[in-house]
Amino acid sequence: MVGRGRNFLFCMNFLHRLRTYNPKTRFSSSASEEGWKLIQFTEIKPFVERCMATVGTKKEHASQLADALIKADYRGHYSHGINRLHMYVKDIKSGITVHDMEPVTVKESAATALVDGQNVLGPVVGNYCMKIAIQKAKETGVGWVVARGSNHYGIAGFYSLQALEEGMMGMSFTNTSPLQVPTRAKKPTLGTNPITLAAPGKNGDSFLLDMATSTAAVGKVEICQRKGTNMPKGWGVDQAGKETTNPDEVLEGGGLMPLGGSEECGGYKGYGLAMLVEIFCGILSGAEWGPNIRKWMKTDRVANLGQCFIAINPENFASGFTDRMQELMDTCRNLEPAEGESEVLVAGDPERKHMSQCDREGGIRYHPNQIAYLEDLAKELGVAPMVSA
Ligand SMILES: NC(=O)c1ccc[n+]([C@@H]2O[C@H](COP(=O)([O-])OP(=O)(O)OC[C@H]3O[C@@H](n4cnc5c(N)ncnc54)[C@H](O)[C@@H]3O)[C@@H](O)[C@H]2O)c1
């Protein structure tokens, strides 16, 4: 079977496998007991590169994509990891994302740069921009870089972490396809527009906030629909803009609520944060913005996403930043937990637990359905699959 029919069957198989895969269990410390299979680190990157090579991706681009996706899985954010590999393969194969260009800087000052991503893979654009931001922060204290002409870049934290590795604060933002309904409106108009801030503490400790600006990701709504359960309040609205706990109503004409949920619960603050991201990304860079961005999972035209990357050198401000940063984190962590809770965390701690487990085991554990999906993808592309440990 060739062409469309084969692709259709592959997609149906893929969707079926993802439907029975629940990324919510990602931080489970007993993943091995649940039948999750371990894939050694050394297996994963070559697999992503093999898959991307079949559609003509440059080795260097495939390598950068692999690093971004694997970092997401390693941190426990499986929704933005190699389970999206088919999407990048498809985009390069169709030519809607290009493989033979490189990002270029089109305007520059001592502390700023405007980059045209030239429609290459998002992580290639993101790495190019963050490298410039870090260099400028080394020279001037701050580097602020925005990109247009970009594509889906994975987890925002992949870029803020790069500044952290240089002892700096890092921030990153991206606009995304419209799924979020502004407070008092009824039409999905903004994306889930993530925000990240990384800040160094002492001895390798750090704060790493990395979050969407909608209350829930669309994938979580889909899981409720599949299970036939209602969603918690604050996740979504129906097509009339009324809050609903029925996932069908959200997915069929409704949309996601901003972080916080309803107006009474402060959802307008999440809406404001999503706007902040859009201003830093689409508006500042001249990329597509808000409802003008192509619809989620539709590749009828180029994405032309806007992104923003900031590096800040704490050395340019009051001395002793990392000491105070560590005290701040420890102050929160050492708070007496509320009744029924065992510990107070700071942003980045849940992911740290997941990474420790991966490090202990020498690889990343994946749900059997995700492994089966990747085996299907390998078969489809005619490449060797990953071998589980
Ligand atoms: N590229 C895109 O288009 C896009 C869009 C949206 C989201 N994303 C990515 O999706 C990923 C997941 O986003 P999310 O909003 O679902 O994340 P999340 O809700 O799992 O976590 C958000 C943040 O809260 C912190 N956190 C979690 N529990 C905590 C606790 N008990 N105490 C203190 N801090 C805690 C985490 O460390 C994290 O920094 C992010 O990496 C984000 O960048 C990407």
Image (cartoon, grey):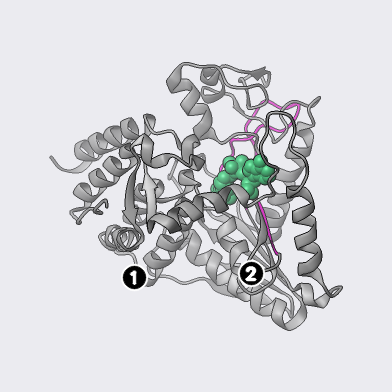
Q: Looking at the image, is 262 positioned above or below residue 18?
A: above
**x%, y% of residue 201?**
71, 65
Residue at 79% in and 31% down: 266
**x%, y% of residue 22?**
43, 33
> Does 136 lie within the magenta span?
no
Of residues 157 and 337, the one nearer the viewer is 337
Residue with the mark numbered 1:
59
* Residue type at the position of mark 1: Lys
**x%, y% of residue 277?**
70, 50
**Nearer the viewer's eye, disc 2 or disc 1?**
2
**x%, y% of residue 255?**
60, 28
What is the span of residues highlighted in magenta in the rendered image?
Answer: 174-200
Residue at 70% in and 67% down: 202
Q: Looking at the image, is 69 positioned above or below residue 189?
A: below
In contact (CB < 8 Å): disc 2 and disc 1: no
Which type of secondary structure does the marked residue at label 1 adopt? Answer: helix
Q: Looking at the image, is 142 positioned above or below residue 257?
A: below
* Residue type at the position of mark 2: Ala
207 vs 383, left or right, is: right
Answer few, some or many: residues within 10 Å of disc 1's Cα (few below 14, many 20 plus, some between 14 and 19).
few
Which type of secondary structure does the marked residue at label 2 adopt? Answer: helix
Figure quadrant of residue 33: top left
Distance from disc 2 to disc 1, alpha carbons, whole Å, reads: 24 Å
Q: Looking at the image, is 304 positioned above or below residue 21?
A: below
> Does 197 lie within the magenta span?
yes
Residue at 66% in and 30% down: 257
Instruction: Tell me the quadrant of the picture where the N terminus can be found.
Output: top left
Residue at 74% in and 74% down: 313
Answer few, some or many: residues within 10 Å of disc 2's Cα (few below 14, many 20 plus, some between 14 and 19).
many
Residue with the mark numbered 2:
163
